[in-house]
Every structure is written in structure tokens, then in C-alpha cells.
Amino acid sequence: HFSVSQLSQRFCEEVAFVKPPYYEIDGGAYIAWKASLEGISTTYKELTQVVEGSKMTTLEKKRLLESGRAVLPNCTATKILVTGNLRCWRNFFELRTAEGADAEIRIVALKIFNLLKKYAPNSFQDYTEKDGVVSTKHRKV
């Protein structure tokens, strides 16, 4: 199985966003997306600045900060650490680089695959990569 640790957004003062991979297809979509993020950033900052210098209890501040996260979109950047055994990673690559997989996870999966193939070549020598799709004849190895 995978074990995942993620940086909490609960106490972030500044937030960053990750552009979805296919917005370059339609420049208008990118412009609209970027404009919406400017409004979201302003709203988030206003919601979280209320705690600065306030006489709220620590718990009240925590509750207000975690409520501020409710305005953040799915594309809010964070840091994630994932560990897993080789069987998990092999399965992950087969599922998450498939043509029908989400574009963002395909990009991440292919980057991780290339790193693991470099550092553990014997464990992934049976895999081939063509047009971003990773596959093997030896599934469930």
C-alpha cells in the first residue's frame, strides 16, 4: 500500500496554484482561471488576516484558519510525500499513465516512473513507455 503525508494548508499564509495542463489549448480558459484565482487569493487573505492581533483563543484562531481553506480551489499547491512498495508503484504506473487517466496525475506518474527506472532499473526493466503510457507484459509481478 501507499503511505501519504501532505503539508496542511491550515496554517499557510500564502497560497500558490498549479495551472491545469490543458489550459494552453484555450487561452480564454486560462485568462478566466487566472482571474478567478486573483479573487480567491484576496478572499482567502481577508479571511485569514482576521486572526492577526486578535484576542481570540488559539482554538478559535485554528477554526477560523481552517474555515478559510473552504474558498481554496482544487488546484491549490501543496507538498506531498508518498512511499510504497514496488508492487504498488508498478500498479500505479499502469493505472495512472493510461490514456484515460487524469492529465495531471499522468504527468506526475511519468516523472516518478522515470526517476524510479533510473534509480531501480532492475525493478522496472520489463516496462516500456510509449507516448506517456507505461506498460508491461508482466503485470502482477
Image (tube, helix red, strand yellow):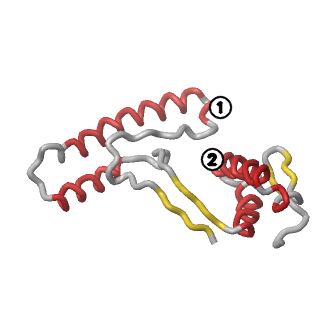
Which residue is the site of mark 1? 25
- Up-down relation of residue 27 to residue 54 (above or below): above
- Up-down relation of residue 30 to residue 61 (above or below): above
Amino acid type, mark 1? Ile
User: Residue placed farthest to the front in the image?
Assistant: 119
Of discs 1 and 2, which sits in the foreground?
A: 2
Amino acid type, mark 2? Glu
- Viewer-proximal residue among 83 and 130: 83
**Which is nearer the N-term, disc 1 or disc 2?**
1
43 left or right, relative to 56: right
Tally of numbered tags: 2
50 left or right, relative to 132: left
Residue 51 position, x and y percent, is 18, 47
Which residue is the site of mark 2? 104
- Viewer-proximal residue among 140 and 95: 140
Q: Secondary structure at mark 2?
A: helix
Q: Secondary structure at mark 1?
A: helix
At horizontal 74% and vertical 65% (from top left) the residue drawn is: 91
At horizontal 64% and vertical 51% (from top left) the residue drawn is: 105
The quarter of the displayed image where residue 14 is located:
top left
Residue 41 position, x and y percent, is 35, 37
At horizontal 35% and vertical 35% (from top left) the residue drawn is: 39
At horizontal 76% and vertical 52% (from top left) the residue drawn is: 119
Quarter occupied by the C terminus: bottom right
- Viewer-proximal residue among 36 and 44: 44
The quarter of the displayed image where residue 86 is located:
bottom right
